[in-house]
Amino acid sequence: MFLCNRGGVPDCVKVLDFGLVREYRNGGRDLTRLIGGNGAEGTPLFMPPEAIDDSARSDPRSDIYSVGALGYYLLTGEYLFAAESIRDLYNKHVSASPIPPSRRTTNQISAALEATILRCLEKEPDLRPQSVAELRALLLTSPCASEWGPEARAAWWSRYQSKTSASVDETDLRKSSSIAANVKIDFDSRIK
């Protein structure tokens, strides 16, 4: 993941490598293979168990596992499993139970959010949320979901912007930027 800045202001988060290997349509039937061959295909730290031995077993629920592994990392600052080798990592994805996120961080994590992340990380795809819509509904049951509305976002960006503006003067940015003459950045609307 990468936090993108434009003109010194955080703009958006981009997922640079999610390990997606196929496009699915028509009820999950594989129509386009982007990477051929059998065996493990994807990003090992976020790879679902079913993709390790045979990527043909992957389906959209495999991406739910990867989203869970990413969520786990974002909550704890730790990867799902620590391993000495790729083989060891694969074995853990297949057979090890993840340590609950709340036990790997001092940050407060709601029981609902933790349960959702752990459900995404179920070894058996049938036990995971079956769609992104179902995952979204589960995430919205977390108490923190209601805490992050438009007002909270604006307040956070305002605090963040004041912290970064102390270290980078907007006028200096415009002078030093090679794109300043071609692109006008409306800094005030960025926090809305």
Image (spheres, rainbow, N blue to C red):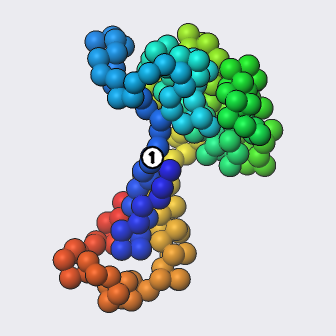
Q: Residue at (48%, 71%) from the top-left corner?
A: 161
**Vertical placement of residue 26 versus 137, above or below:** above
Q: Residue at (48%, 55%) from the top-left corner?
A: 2
Can you name the residue that lies furthest to the front here? Answer: 37
In the displayed structure image, the side of residue 182 where residue 65 appears, left or right: right
In the displayed structure image, the side of residue 18 where residue 70 appears, left or right: right
Coordinates of residue 181 in the picture (x, y in percent)? 20, 82
Residue picked out by circle 1: 15
**Vertical placement of residue 122 versus 102, above or below:** above
Instruction: Give the residue type at disc 1.
Output: Val
**Vertical placement of residue 158 versus 95, above or below:** below
Q: Quick one: label 1, few (<14), some, or many (20+) residues within 10 Å?
A: few
SS for callout 1: loop
For the question of whether residue 167 can be seen, the reply is: yes
Coordinates of residue 84 in the picture (x, y in percent)? 77, 40
Q: Residue at (50%, 50%) from the top-left corner?
A: 1
Quarter of the image for residue 10 reads bottom left
Quarter of the image for residue 90 reads top right
Q: Which of 51 and 116 is in front in this view?
A: 51
Can you name the residue that lies furthest to the left here? Answer: 182
For the question of whether residue 64 can be seen, the reply is: no
Q: Residue at (35%, 87%) from the top-left corner?
A: 176
